[in-house]
Image (cartoon, grey):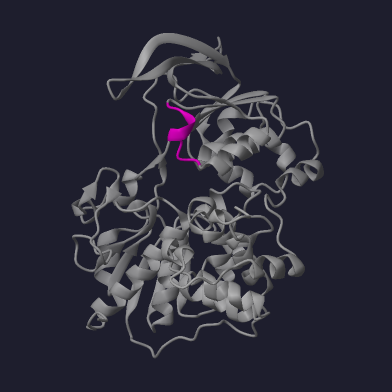
Amino acid sequence: MIESISYLPTSKEANESLAKHFTDLAPALTARQAAIEASRCLYCYDAPCTRICPSEIDVASFIRNIHDENINGAAVGILKQNILGGSCSRVCPTEILCEDACVRNHDAEGQPVKIGLLQRYAIDNMQLEEHPFKRFAATGKKIAVVGAGPAGLSCAHRLAMLGNDVVIYEAREKSGGLNEYGIAKYKLTDNFAQKEVDFLLQIGGITIKHGQALGVNVQLRDLHAGYDAVFLGLGLGASKQMGLTGEDAPGLLAAVDYIAELRQSDDLSKLPVPSRAIVIGAGNTAIDMAVQIQRLGADEVTLVYRRGFEAMSATEHEQHIAKENQVRMRTWAQPQQVLLDDAGRVRGMRFEKTAVVNGRLAGTGETFEIAADAIFKAIGQSMDEVSISDSLAKTLKRDGDKIYVDAQFRTVLPGIYAGGDCVAPGQDLTVQAVQHGKLAAHAIHQDINGLKEAA
């Protein structure tokens, strides 16, 4: 964890000053702004924004409701398809999904409707007297859900709504998964992740047990024997290794660990902040890490990626955020050696320049060094092998780091289902994890209650 860089100085700014750097990245719309933006929607028949939405939200319908000042109707329409619609409106890459598909990109204005902000407006301003969904008649069935992240929470809510009882086993102290621990602090502010969990639990029929880690104090074989079904929403809990000597040296750590500490900190001024930092990676986590360490007061932050900007998994929007925050971005370079000082601590990294040769990425032999007091790796997550270490879990069929499931999110083990980042198909998006959980819940409900799939 971040103790490995605890010898570094803390920020020069006070907590109150630092907190101002972590307010909303995109401020919420006012009522007038929402009304104007909703009026721009053409309410397309067979709207492309709806077709591309991973959680199948009827975008045109909820925007029309906002235009008609039916905010509750808009919110319920969103939540019916995506119970975590509030967080998704903040973290979903709308610029490559619904807003990219908006037909207004191609008219004289050339600007899409601000769908993400309108979705947030509806959820933030709904005024419901009670939870919008009622539980169906009790089925007498009980399901175990492993992981209280977006996939697990979505699955649990839908199962509970269908009349089943659910027990969620969560390894951490709080629910929410990446929404609580892994998203940049300026994207989900004001303890929103926990507020969303509290709202979701109002459906009833869901119990959450924290501090319960699969493979440690909870075993899959016991859950399989004790419940009518099990859903695995494990996420990917381990950071991938670069395979370099010195990777365990003080000053080199996983970006997700630092981000988790940052999100849970009550006093940002006490976090260790290197003067010079290197971030290795090309995804949203790498961008989040680089921007946040810059905002905490680092003098120089350099993000390094082995290919070009066009190959980054971080969207152009995310790349723009990094550049706006004075993050230096070096492409076509791969880590070659961790450089250590006499005390064995990180002092920098040597990189080898890269190029595509005969269709393959290759080193050119030319190297350069970047000085740094800390290095954060954000090169992807992998399956935590401990979580699937018991005799039953070992028999799960896997595709590399991910669990293989069929179209109904069934694993090869009868009665065990999986979804979210831990399964083979998908783009590792929060909104897609929510959809996996929802669809898996329907499959579980049908299977354990002997129901036929709807035609």
Residue 81, position as x, y percentages in the image: 46, 72
| Residue 79 forms part of the magenta stretch | no
Task: Pick whichever, 103 or 78, lies toward us.
Answer: 103
Q: Quadrant of the C terminus?
A: bottom left
The one of 115 and 217 positioned closer to us in this rendering: 115
Residue at point 63% right, 71% down?
122
Q: Position of residue 92 (x, y in %)?
A: 53, 55
Query: Of residues 46 and 332, which is closer to you in this image?
Result: 46
| 390 sits left or right of 98 in the view | left
The correct choice, above or below, for 380 with respect to 48 in the image is above
Residue 94 in sight here: yes
* Residue 169 in view, yes or no: no
- Above or below 190: residue 124: below
Residue shown at 42% from the left, 78% from the top: 160
Work out whether 286 lies above or below 38. Answer: above
Image quadrant where residue 67 sits: bottom right
What residue is shown at x 20% (from left), y 52% (from top)? 397
Which secondary structure is most common in the magenta stretch? loop
Q: How many marks?
A: 0
Q: Which residues are magenta?
A: 307-314
Q: Quadrant of residue 419?
A: bottom left
Residue 280: x and y, percent?
49, 29
